[in-house]
Every structure is written in structure tokens, then in C-alpha cells.
Image (cartoon, rainbow, N blue to C red):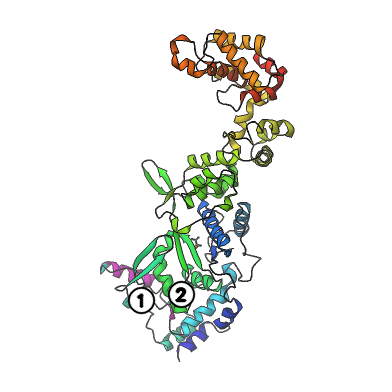
Amino acid sequence: MDYKDLANLIFPDIKDYTYYEEKYPERNLPEGAEVLRVAPSPTGFIHIGGLFQGLLAKKIADQTGGVFFVRIEDTDQKRKIDNGVEEILNAFEKYGLSPDETVGRGNYGPYIQSERGDIYKSYAKKLISEGKAYPCFCTPEELEESRSNQEKAKERTGYYGKWAKCRNMPIDMAIEKIKNGVPYVVRFRSPGNPERKIKHKDVIKGSIDFPENDLDIIIIKSDGLPTYHFAHAVDDHLMRTTLVTRSDEWVSSVPLHLQLFYELGFKIPKYGHTAPLMKQDGDSKRKLSKRKDPEAAVSYYTEEGIPKESVIEYMMNIINSNFEMWRKQNPDKDINEFEVDIRKMGVSGALFDMVKMHDVSKNVISRFSAEKVYEDAKAWAEVYDSELNEMLENKEYSLRILGIERGNQKPRKDIAKWSDLKDIIYYMYPEKFNKMDKNAFEYQKVTDKSEIEKIVKLYFEKYYNENDDKETWFNKMKDLAGELGYAREVKEFKANPDGYKGHVGDISTVIRVTLTGKCNTPDLYEIIRILGKEEILRRVK
Ligand code: GLU
């Protein structure tokens, strides 16, 4: 009896690996093209980090004329949920990260691990027949005992060297046990020696030294499915991945992965391990947590109404810090024109900061047309906010409101997310304005009631004319200021603050707050035009 017999006994009807090598040949791609993937698990929770990985992978694939694919890692059957796969693929689609290949399309599939069982077995069979893998019959109790012995002896824990009980079991004995139905897993026979160091160059992290791996890890579990490590090697080989990008929780597994690739006879891909997304928590930073931080879930952005463009734009800031400068210089360029340089990614965790996200989003939305703001906000409101949905019912009126200070040199930047929109445009609707608490109006410098009355009264009796153009309108505001003892220009006031009651800005603020309840609004002239004479006078009354 030899290793081949053992392999045939364990995997009797499994195709030779050469079949798969031929079926999934090297990809015929131009020089420099990279093949990248993301490999999410369908657990029902889509982490924002997964989207981040997708953006990075897709960008590099697209930039190099390569391929971006999504592979579903569902070998952990306990964590898997029913619509998990669909949800993941929809999320990628929605955020514009449509893969070239995934479940249902592409020549290197199946792209879902639970459908690749025979493929993993074929390569496990190859390893067993070469003596590079073996069945292990250790029970959980035996493994636990070994572990506590290791701890007592102050030795490294794990299944390796002399602690790997089944590693040197005679073949006949293993065959006998299998024939008798003793349960087993398949383990990799590691040829490594941790006294030896290996040098590895990570595309993001640079050179790293590791001790060699010597753990005999499980490659096929008792349920017949592969472990992550083994599936990674087999899949990324057969799917011809050239650059493995993934989160740096996997970096410590690199020595094992290099060894697996080598022993399987696979060409080793490049690796790029990305630093985790971090969250400021008091004085310290920690990893963004699925349990503690709502913003860790992709669904959060949908619910809050943060546009997908904003999320992608913010993530680009994290991928390469020079993106911010690029965007400043190219405010109107398509984001896809920005070249990502993976070697310039940060090696320490970047803050995933909602304040910054909102800031970026305000800029992104400021570049939207009124029509797009309307369509996106309406679609959001239909699901999440019936009151806003009603307000947006009148499309023509809504477009006028949303169009204020848009499409010009200095567009308005007051909207970060659709869930803020209702408050921002509330006062533009007469029946909503009626409901506003007039005592809470945000008068600023001029708060004296009789003074406010005086300003408003004089303005509407003497100066306001609905047909004024903007310049005339503004000049009248200055005249009004002058007439009431306020400086016509801010700088006049600054030069002689005791000579005036205030300045023209204080006057226009009084008008603004009277008409809208707010001291910060987009262009007041536009607001007055849109509300119209009748409504304005009604409000003043
Ligand atoms: N399923 C693994 C994870 O979600 C994939 C890691 C990888 O990209 O290789 O962490």
C-alpha cells in the first residue's frame, strides 16, 4: 500500500487535477494586466470593508486591462444565509463595482466555493498521493489534550512536528481506520521549519520577514469542504488571480499560503494586504466594528441616504491620500480618471470618519444636477421618509428649490445625505413653514423684536420689488442698511464699528430668518423669487 492507494481510497471518483489545469488555462491578457478578486462570505452582513476591497480590486483590474471577479466563500455553512449571495452581488452592482466574472458569468467558475467541492478534492488527492497531505483521525478531545500538554510544556500550540500525531501514521493503519469508518479530516504535511526565515514582498506593506510555517493545517474538513487556506490556494490558482488584495488580518497566513502554493506546484501570486478601516473611539483608534458601529454595514449608507457616489468618493480618499488633491484640481472629472497606485496605500489603519464622509458627500452632491438630486432623493424618500416624499411630489417646484446655487462656479454644499434634505428645504413649503416654531427662529445679531419689525417693515414697504434683478435687489439691501444706521459694506463697519448699529449682513440676516427661520440658507434672492410675492408677504405678516 502506498500514498496513491490512500489517495484513491479517500477520493475514489475524483478527476485528476490535470483536467482542471486544462479547463482553466492561463488567461490570455496583455502584459501588465492584473487579475484581482474579492471573496466575501454570504453571511447577510455586508461590511463596508468588503466594498472597499471591491473598489480597490476593480480599479486596479480596470486600470491594467485585467479582470475583476467576485468569488463567494461559503464553505462555512453555519454562517451562511439564504439570500446572502444575491445581497452581495446586488451591493457590488449598486456601487458600480460590477465584476467581470462572478456567479452566473465567466469561464473560470463556478464562482461559489460550495459548488467547487470536487475541484478541491482533486488537489487534495494530488497532495495525498504525493505524501504531502494525510488523513488525521484526532478527535476534538485528543486535540484539546495535546494543546494542554503543549501549554504545560510551555511549547507553541498547534498541530506540528512531534505534536502532529497522525502525521507519521503508517499508511496501512490509516487505510484500515478509513475502512472502519473512523471520521477524519485531511491535513497538509508542512515541510517547513520555523528556524528558517522567509522574505516576502507585499505590494502594500513592503518586505516582511516570517518564520516558515510548520503547522499541518486542515485542508479538507470532515464535511468534505475545504478550509479557507486551501480554497484560497486552489481557487486563486485556477482562477488565475495575479494579485491577491485582502485585509491584513491574513498577512500572518502568508507563510502558510506560500508553502501551499509551492507544494501544489502553483505559481505564487502577488499579495497586497490592506490596513484595516479604523474608528476614533475617545482618545484611541480601533478597528471599525461590525458589532459596535452602524457605519460598518453597507446598508447604513442606503438607510441614511448617503449617495453611492459619495461612499465611493470617500473610499478613494482612503485608498490613496493624493486623491484629495487630484479632486481639488479636477472637480469635474469622472472619478475613474483617477489612477490608483496600490504601492502608495497606507500601511497603518486609516480612519473611517463619518464627519469627513459627510464633508466629501456635500462636495459630491454639490456637483449633481438638480434633476439628479431630485431623482435620488425622491427614490430614497419613497422608502424611508413619507413626509419628504410628499414634499417632493411637485417635481417642478422641487427642481427650482434644488436648483438654487447649482451648476455654477460655487455650488451650494449644504446637503450631505438625503435624510438631511427635509430640514434643509422645509421652509420652502408654505404649510411646513406654518408649522415652524417662530420663537425658535435663529435671529443672530439683531434680536430685539421692535428692531426686527422696523427692518422688515421698511424693507417691504419701501424697497422690495418682486421684479428686481439680483444686483438691484442687493443694492436695495444696502440702501435699507444705510437708512437704518447700519454700514452698507462689511468693511466700512469693521473700520468703524462704533459708528454703526451693524452692517448690511445683519440686515439681510433679519430678512432671511424672517422668511425661512434659518440664518444659513442658500441664496436669499433666489429663495425670495421662488417663494413669490404673495407667500413672502404672507410670511412677513
Ligand atoms: N472570505 C475571506 C474574508 O472574508 C476572504 C479573504 C480573501 O480575500 O482572501 O475574509
**3D distance between C-alphas at marks 2 and 1:** 13 Å
Residue 214 in the image: state x and y as whole percent.
36, 74
**Disc 2 and disc 1 in contact, CB within 8 angstroms:** no
Location of mark 2 (residue): 261
Q: Quadrant of residue 119?
A: bottom right
Query: Helix, strand or loop at disc 1?
Result: loop
Residue 43 in the image: state x and y as whole percent.
55, 57
Q: Amino acid at mark 2?
A: Phe
**Position of residue 534 in the picture relative to residue 158 (left or right):** right
- Which segment did they paint magenta? 130-151
**In the image, residue 159 lies in the stretch drawn in magenta:** no
Q: Please identify the quadrant where the C terminus is shown.
A: top right
Query: Helix, strand or loop at disc 2?
Result: helix
In front here: 495 or 33?
A: 495
Q: Amino acid at mark 1?
A: Gly
Residue 388 in the image: state x and y as whole percent.
66, 34
Location of mark 1 (residue): 192
Label 1 Cα crowd, 10 Å radius (few <14 / some 14-19 / many 20+): some
The first of marks 2 and 1 along the sequence is: 1
